[in-house]
Image (tube, coloured by chain):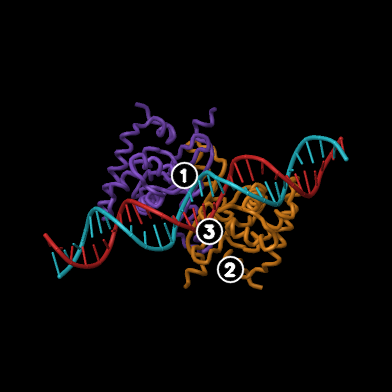
Chain colours: A orange, B purple, C red, D cyan
Amino acid sequence: MEKPTNQFEQFDNHNHAACIETALGLAEQICRNKGIRLTPLRREVLRLVWENHRPVGAYQLLEQLRLGSQAKPPTIYRALNFLQQAGLVHRLATLNAYIGCACPGDAQHGPFLICNRCQSLVELNATSVNTAIARCTEAVGFQVSSLIVEVHGLCPGCQER
Amino acid sequence: MEKPTNQFEQFDNHNHAACIETALGLAEQICRNKGIRLTPLRREVLRLVWENHRPVGAYQLLEQLRLGSQAKPPTIYRALNFLQQAGLVHRLATLNAYIGCACPGDAQHGPFLICNRCQSLVELNATSVNTAIARCTEAVGFQVSSLIVEVHGLCPGCQER
DNA sequence: CAATTTATTGTTATAATATAACATAACATT
DNA sequence: AATGTTATGTTATATTATAACAATAAATTG
């Protein structure tokens, strides 16, 4: 089997079912370690986030969840907030949308590359960017508590067309 | 007169009235050069943005504007969109708020450092960060169209308390 | 200059995103 | 079972933003 040349291709031809299961399994583990509860509802929301596998809005998730329930907005927002705090999903400020975290547990979370055409997203793990930012902020004496880097543009596949 | 040790101090003891006038004058110039119209309404919105001199929401601006008119939301959003496209204000995705651009005309717009305590904001002009991001995106073949970097934390003044 | 087109602003209504506040239920520990 | 805690359900509403169309002002052309 050939190696994918980049993350975007990886995204296109991955085994989706397995990828969801992996993410959920890892989430169980992480929650167990942290002593926090991945309840059925939270787990289901996380599953939906991964099933979409691209940035997805809270109300979209709500509809998907609703197929089997009568959940209302606070339900989904609470679940998403929990998952965010647990480091299992990210909120994308430029999209008002959510995405499963590609590397939960990691200290650093790299730039998000968001394709404006196909809505695919890749989470890079680029220490260099965070380092560059750290240098600037230190220079002016600013104490960082959180950091978001969102890059919009065209993924390799969408540039061709 | 002593040199300020960093941008945040600069922010604290600047001549506010003069700073607003400078920004407006520069805006006039830029619009003239670009052949776009800085109408009285747009100019007034820009003036309010600078008067606040920290990230300010669209509805806050609307209220401030309303003191002399009956403006409704589209009015303010249209003005803000125009000012954004003209490169005169930035929208902060993490705050749903707007701030006057510190260096209109520049090609690059650096990281925004947002103090969670006093809501002050500094726009750095850090080529290094943009360079680091460019390197990462090139590596995966992603074509950048826009870029946002928002850093939250504590400014030097607020760390002391 | 009047006529016409284009750009801007006004107005009404509503969409999209998110949270406050309180009620109920589940769970965990005694 | 009694108690405290965490999680979920429910109602209402806040906040942010835009669509669609009407009226006005400014620029352009004949």
Image point (54%, 31%), residue name: B159
Q: Are marks 1 and 3 in contact (CB under 8 Å)?
A: no
**Would you name the residue on which mark 1 appears?**
B112
**Would you name the residue on which mark 3 appears?**
A113
Q: How far is the residue under mark 1 from the one under mark 3? A: 19 Å
**x, y (%) of residue B120?**
46, 37
Q: Give the left or right position of residue C27, taking residue B34 as reference.
A: right
Amino acid type for the residue under numbered disc 1: Phe
For the question of whether residue A21 can be seen, the reply is yes
Amino acid type for the residue under numbered disc 3: Leu
> Camera-side residue: B123 or B41?
B41
Q: Is B150 drawn above or below residue A9 in the view shown?
A: above
Quarter of the rendering occupied by the N terminus of chain B: top left
Image point (60%, 52%), residue name: A90
Closer to the chain start, of discs 3 and 2, is 2
**x, y (%) of residue B128?**
46, 48
Res A9 label: 2
Nearest to the eye among marks 2 and 1: give it. 1
Within 10 Å of disc 2 (Cα), the crowding (few <14, some 14-19, many 20+) is some
